[in-house]
Image (tube, rainbow, N blue to C red):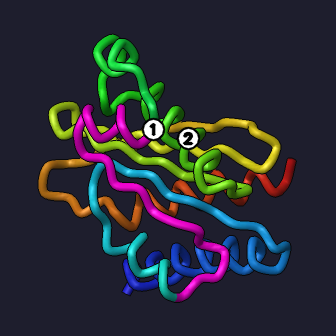
């Protein structure tokens, strides 16, 4: 029962953020290197959701987000720097007010999350995960928490 309540709280946070974006005529884009059901579910039901980029390889990140191979090689394709770059580019390409990007490093069991808000401010954080853990809900809840915090600034 406790996990159901937590799940409801996560859904409520995401719904609150999406409603606020819609009420303010603002849009949000997603960029990720792993496919998620969560993001694809938003496409059909949220007016403020502008689009989703999925770039699982270095070549895709270079082609879709214009991330130089020097950055990918120096920092890693699942690094904080790469994730921030993806968020910046998703926001710019789709001309949205906000963008969220996520990358998953399966070797280090870490997911990086980055957002860029309507003022161009960037925020990022990492979330550890276990090999067998489904972290999708946790990741998107944290991402929307970062967006909500940017409303308060």
Which dot marks residue 89?
A: 2
Q: Residue at x 41, y 61 (%)?
A: 138
Q: CA distance from mark 2 to mark 1?
A: 6 Å
Residue found at x 28% / y 61% = 35
Q: Is residue 28 above or below residue 91?
A: below
Residue at 74% across / 53% down in the picture? 149
Contact, mark 2 vs mark 1 (Cβ under 8 Å): yes
- In percent of width and height, residue 90 lies at 55, 48
Q: Secondary structure at mark 2?
A: helix
Kindly identify the residue that appears in the image at 59 percent across and 68 percent down.
50
- The quarter of the picture where residue 54 lies is bottom left
Q: Residue 111 appears at what percent x and percent y?
A: 35, 43
Q: Nearer the viewer, residue 131 or 57?
A: 57
| Span shown in magenta | 45-64
Residue on which disc 1 sits:
65
Whether 110 is among the magenta residues is: no
Callout 1: 10 Å neighbours few (<14), some, many (20+)? many
The local secondary structure at tag 1 comes to: helix
Residue 130 lies, with reference to residue 133, above or below; the image says: above
Is residue 1 rendered to the left or right of residue 20?
left
Q: Is residue 57 magenta?
A: yes
């Amino acid at each position: 029962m406790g996990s159901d309540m937590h799940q409801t709280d996560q859904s409520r946070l995401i719904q609150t953020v999406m409603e606020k974006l819609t009420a303010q005529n603002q849009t949000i884009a997603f960029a990720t290197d792993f496919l998620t059901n969560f993001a694809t579910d938003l496409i059909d039901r949220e007016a403020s959701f502008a689009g989703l980029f999925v770039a699982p390889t270095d070549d895709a990140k270079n082609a879709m987000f214009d991330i130089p191979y020097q950055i990918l090689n120096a920092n890693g394709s699942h690094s904080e720097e790469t994730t921030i770059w993806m968020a910046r580019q998703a926001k710019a390409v789709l001309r949205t007010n906000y963008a969220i990007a996520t990358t998953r490093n399966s070797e280090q069991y870490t997911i990086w999350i980055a957002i860029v808000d309507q003022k161009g401010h960037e925020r990022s954080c990492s979330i550890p995960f276990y090999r067998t853990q489904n972290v999708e809900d946790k990741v998107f809840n944290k991402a929307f928490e970062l967006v909500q915090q940017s409303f308060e600034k």
